[in-house]
Image (spheres, rainbow, N blue to C red):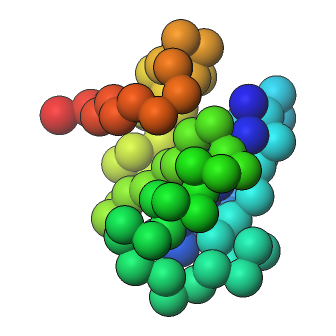
Amino acid sequence: MRLLLDESVPVRLRRFLPSHSVKTVVERGWEGVKNGALLVLAAKEFDAFLTVDKNLPYQLPLVQTLEQALGSLQPCTFIRLGA
């Protein structure tokens, strides 16, 4: 699956998703692009857009749940993991 990590997502999350092609907003040159425009860009090239606000250590337990969700994710859909 082609994944795009938002600027708020630490790049090190990539190593927990080795079975996916992972790029970042910064790598694509899209830093500073706002919500709607960023989603439009992402939808053209990626299967999923991952974003978090903060506290990756708190969210790391969600990696297994994330892998399961990505296995059944349909294009152009929205899911929320965790609380």
Q: Is residue 78 above or below residue 32?
A: above
Residue 63 shows in this picture: yes
Q: Is residue 54 visible?
A: no
Residue 49 at what x, y percent from top left? 53, 49
Percent x, y for residue 59? Answer: 39, 45
Residue name at image x 50 percent, y 49 percent: 50
Give residue 26's position: percent from left, percent from top: 68, 78
Horizontal side of 67 relative to 54 (left or right) equals right
Answer left or right for 20 relative to 52.
right
Q: Nearer the viewer, residue 52 or 23?
A: 23
Q: Is residue 22 above or below residue 2?
A: below
Q: Is residue 36 above or below residue 67?
A: below
Up the image or down, 53 lies above or below 77; here it is below
Which residue lies at the image location 35% right of the left edge and 34% below the top edge? 78
Q: Quadrant of residue 41?
A: bottom right
Query: Looking at the image, which is closer to me, 50 or 46?
Result: 46
Q: Residue 7: percent from the left, percent from the top? A: 53, 73
Asked whether, in this view, residue 23 is left or right of residue 9, the answer is: right
Q: How many marks?
A: 0
Q: Residue at x 72, y 82 (%)?
A: 29
Residue at 36 percent across and 70 percent down: it is 35
